[in-house]
Each structure stands twice: as structure tokens, then as C-alpha cells.
Image (cartoon, coloured by chain):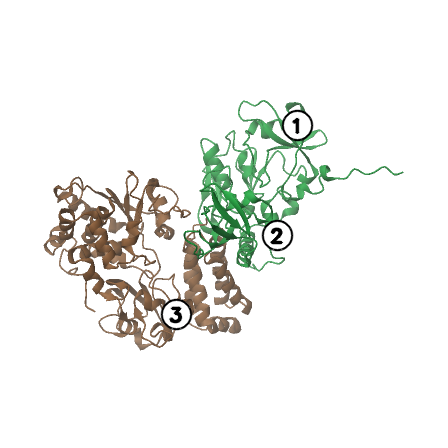
Chain colours: A green, B brown
Amino acid sequence: MVKVTIDNIEVEVEPGTTILNAARKIGGKIVPPAMCYYSKLKGTGGKCRTCLVKVTKGSEKDPRPMPKLVPSCSTAVMDGMVVQNITSPEVLEARKAIVEFLLINHPLDCPVCDQAGECDLQNLSYEHGLSETRYEEERRTFEKIDIGDKIQLHMTRCILCYRCVFVADQLTEKRVHGIMNRGDVAEISTYIKNSVDNEFSGNMIDACPVGALTDKTFRFKSRVWFAKACDAHRNCTHCGGKVTVWMAGNDILRVTGRKDKYGEVEEFICNECRFEKKDLKDWVIEGPRKISRESVISQNHYMNKNKPEKKK
Amino acid sequence: MEKKILLANIETPDFGKFETFRKQGGYAAVEKALKTMSPENVVDEVKKSGLRGRGGAGFPTGLKWSFIDKSTNNPRYLLCNADEGEPGTFKDHYLILKNPHLLIEGMILSSFALGANTAYIFLRGEWFYLMKILDQAIEEAYAKGYLGKNILGTDFSLDLYCHPGGGAYICGEETALIEALEGKRGNPRMKPPFPAIKGLYQNPTCVNNVETIAAVPWIINNGGCEYANVGIGKSTGTKLISACGHINKPGVYEIEMGLPVEEFIYSEKYLGGIKNGKKLKAVIAGGSSVPILPTELILKTAKGEPRLLSYESLADGGFETGTMMGSGGFIVMDETTCMVKSLLNYSRFYHHESCGQCSPCREGTGWMEKILHRIEHGQGNMHDIDLLVDIAKHVEGNTICPLGEAAAWPVRSSILHFRKEFEAHVINKKCTFNNG
């Protein structure tokens, strides 16, 4: 085991653990945000740069500080390493700048976005963003594209985190989509005349940190914070069948994978469970889902409501 | 300052052909190394020579070679970075054009030192015609027994391939080069692991620049100490400088490290002074990605000492008053040059060439170009100048690869040294330099 100190809190972790995962072991406010890293997908991370931290001491053997901020999601800890996250003004300034960069080509259309309430960028902007933009230039916009019969791509919102590309690469056969072009004209797209129809492709929606990929069977049906989330399961021949169903009364509005407190699905689910099983009879309801993310979903949820007391 | 190591004899007719090159002493270093030296001896000689990477970073070559993971039995690879794409830099192109066999000889020696049995020259896509020259030279080397199995009857075997890139600037970054060579999109990889541990096909790999590799034969022939005697201080040997801009004699020059910048610009032997007798205004000394310096700082350091063409002297003073050797692309600007327009050109380039993987580079390079475009066309305001500096500061150091710095440094240094010109554009609401 190696010892690492993050924001003055010491933790012991396995050698090879990244700074981000060491921070997740400690938990709380000192966990750096991550827009592109996804622990369930190999090779993710390092791209969005929101998780940059300052290493003030490399290790016991080599105590020199690292010359630049490093991405915590892809930098392994060393024994004796000292890291600053929210205790470093430099890190907070850089994070503020990264949020500004990300919002250049991401509209703040949260009021009409299906991802509102469970959007990582929304939370990140709230914590680190500026109240006014300094960007006066033209922004890029795209027409919405149906990249499959169940998934809609709204590239205007895409922050090019590559998570959906990794999902496609690692979970689905016959991958048909990826990144086209480069720089700020890069875009997610399917190959010519192809559409995404693999039975695990719906997981791209869960992995998308913003509202670029949305579930066409749920779009505009409800705001997520109005729906009640319940854990449910069924016998599925394709996946584990463990899901979260989002209901209004007894109607199932949408089905997603169960997400942990960092917004990452615990188990990937198949398209049949996600898109086709919307009847209450299809599922065994286990009980209310505890949404532990710092999100609007966990606010005002029926679970958190105090039962009104009877007037005497 | 007449020393010629890389460009010696290049004016000999048919010097690019094997027989001519051989008659002039070519491939003697291969014979010497393979028959009388061990790979460790070759590494030691390169270490003694003080040779530093000529691609831009200036990292000690021998030290870089010693990082190669020799603990595994996996194959090792040597990759020659011939993807030279920095605006203003064209010295590798010239070297390959004039002296292809020197590069091949260097590849054999370097591969021998690293224990690599397969090597690639990753050639910039736009230089397809150079590929024919290299392929011809490689074919000749195979035919004469300098490449292939059991070279010169020794145990050492080497296969050498020339591989054209797709013509993206980012493929000059070593990990993007590896990705491209593997047939993937040329996106830089996250480091660590470094290529010396996991490079091409996840095997130990060393990536060196054309000019670096081409210096190895002379070092083996004459000894590392002899090479270290050429040049000045820790800037040993010679350096190819590709000079362009408002000068009388643009071209590629081989200079001994330590040549005064003033002599290089004004001497008839080199650039022959500023074109049409105009005054010197600024120089970018190491390709467009390094800080620009005005006349008073490029000819003399902040301490008033003559500025020399060496890693240390060019960097003297740090970002505030210094610059870098970089890739050796020496861009000279006279008094008629509009600094805003010039910077806009470079910013357009870096915006266009950003791979788009990481947010600061993807969004920041475009933002800077758009603001510069407004300022140059009289639509900027004073606040934009500070905003540019702020954006550049947040792109710099926060990106996956050094393209962020390459895009940010020209912006920061141009505003640092020529701020009044930016302000003049804002005040006059137009470009005051009518130089087209």
C-alpha cells in the first residue's frame, strides 16, 4: 500500500491507483470533478482536464513538485505524494477556465434539456463557472441527428468527452460511430449511412455527461426530478436486468442503468430492458432508489420530504 | 564556424546515391560500430557527445536512449520523426532531400544502440516525393547489405520502412505519431506511460528527430568527445537552421552552436541582412511555437550580451526576455510587418491543427484566433488584449500535449513585446500596416 495526502487528508491505496480514485476513497468535497473519466470503461480520462490537480510533492523518494497541473484521473499516486485539489487557488482558477472553455460550445439550455438535473456540466458550472460569459464569437451549432431509432444526437451540446466512443468500442459489436474531423469542428457521428442499433448501444446515453445523447423514448416526457426513481429488476437473457425505473405514478417513463454517486452506471444494461420494457408488469420493483449524487434529483425528491404532520 | 557535419559534401553530384555517399566515407560508422563496438559503447559515445534532440525539446539523446526498457523480451522500435510541420521549419526536409543515406546510416546505428530490429521513418504526408528518394535509398542499402538480416555478416538485423503520414501537424508529437503509425487517428496519448516503456504496439520505443539521428554517424566516426568540442557549453555540435522571412538569403544553414545571432542575420555568409535594406523588427528563432523577440532582445540578451544561437543563450532571461532554440525555424520580420496579422496567421494554424481531444486546446485555440481576427480587422477593444493573454495562460500547461504551449506562447510573447501595436489596431479601428 502507498500513502498519499490529498488536501491535507492522508489515505492508503493500492500501488497504481490514480489520484482521482484515491480522492474518491476519501470522498466528499475533495474529489475532483470528472467529465470524461469513467471508471467502468478502460482508457477513459485525461481529455476534459476538469480533474487537474497540483502535486506539491512527487513522492518520498523524489519530493520535487510536478511542474504543471496534472490530470488526477490518469496520474498514478506515489508513496508520500502530496496533492492539492480544492486547497489550491491555482487548481480552482484552472478549473474555472476549463468550465469556461467547455461552455463555449455548450449552450446553457438546461431549461429544455433532458439531461437537466443529472448533468455533470450543469453541476460543474454551478460550482466553478462565471456568471457572465466573456465569449462574444460565433458558436457552433448542429442539426439534431437520429443516430439510431432510439437515440438522438444533439451535437450542439456535445463536449467531446469521448465516453460514448469508448462505450461503443468496448461494449458493442459492429461499432459504427466515432469522432469525425478535428479541433473544434470535431463531431460525433455515425459512419456514412449507418445507424447505431447494437443491443447495448443505449449505454452511450447513460455515459454521456451532458445532454448530447438522449433517449428518444423519454425525451420531453418529464423532468427527472418530477419522476420517482426505483430500483427494479427482471430476468433478462442479455444483461443482468438490474435497472432504475423512473416513474410517474404507475407509469414507467424511462429505464436507466443504476448509477453510483459519481454518476457512473454500476452495470451496463441492454436495449431491450432500457427501451422496450416500460410496463410495470415487466419489472420487480425493489424500492426507492437513493440518489446520492449532489444533484437536483436528490433535492425535493419524495424520499427527502418530511411527512406533513396532522393538524391538531 | 565552418564546421559541416550534416551537410558536408552535399554538393557532390549524385550525393543521394549509395555509391557516391559510400565513396565520401558514408556507412563507415556502421562498419565501425557493428564490428568493433557494443550497443552500450554507441550509447556511451552519444552521451559523451552531449547531443540534444533537434526536434524542439532539446532533451539529451543518450539519456533518452538509456530510458528504453530493456527488461522485457518484447521487440523494441526506433521511430524517426520526419513529420516536420512547424511553420518556418524545413531543415529536415532539406536534409532528407540532399542526404538520405546519412539518415539511413544514423537509423542503423541508433537501432543497433537501442537493440531495435525494426525501425520506421514517419514522413510528413505532404512530402510524398521525398518518400521516393528515401525508398530508393533504403532499397540501395538493402541491396548492399546494410539493411536486412545479419548486416555486414554480424548478428544484427534491421528492417527499415518509410511510412507517410496523413499530413496533420499533431502527428509530429511523438505519441500521436505512434498512434498514427499504428493506423489510428493521430491523437496524442496520455503520458505516462512514456514511449520508452510502452510505445509502438505497447512495446519499448524511441522517437528521435531526423536531424538528431543524422548526427550519430559523425559521432561514431569521430568520437563523442570530438562532437562535444564543437559548439558551446551544453549546446554541442552543429545545428541546422531554416531561415525565412524578410532576409536576402533564405535557406537551410548548418551552423556551429554558439554563432552570434547578429552575425547570422547580417553576415553575407549566412542570411545577408534584411531584404531591401529595411530595419529588423522581430525574430521567431525556433519555429512558430516559440516566443517572438523584438530586435533589441534577439540581437542582445537583457544583460546586454550578444545573443548566440545556442539553447542556453536563446533561453536566457526566461519567457520575459528570452525564447527557445525549438526546431530551428528562424523567421525574420522587418519593420513593415504587422505583428497582429502575423500572430493571427500562427493562431489560425494552431486552431486548425488542434486535434480536439482536450478542452483547453480545442476551444482556446479557436477563441484566440477569432479575437485576433477581430483586432486585426479593427473590430477589437482594449479588453480583448487582456482577454487574449488570459486565455493563453489557461491553455498553456493545461493540455495533453505541447500544442497548447505552441499556441499560447506566440500570443503571450507578441502582446508582451508589441502591445502598443495591438492597442493601435483597437484605437485606429484598422490595421495600420498596409503590407497586404
B53 or A246, nearer to the observer = B53
Q: Write down the residue under mark 3.
A: B317
Q: Amino acid at mark 3?
A: Gly
| N-terminal-most mark, 1 or 2 | 2
B21 or B370, nearer to the observer = B21
Q: Is residue A105 toward the left or the right of residue B268 in the image? A: right
- Label 1: chain letter: A
Question: Same chain, marks 2 and 3?
Answer: no
Quadrant position of residue B381? bottom right
B166 or A129, nearer to the observer = A129
Helix, strand or loop under label 2: helix
Q: Is residue A89 toward the left or the right of residue B253 in the image? A: right
Q: Write down the residue under mark 2.
A: A127
B350 or B145, nearer to the observer = B145
Picture coordinates of residue A172, whole percent (x, y): 47, 32
Q: Amino acid at mark 1?
A: Glu
Picture coordinates of residue B229, whole percent (x, y): 21, 64
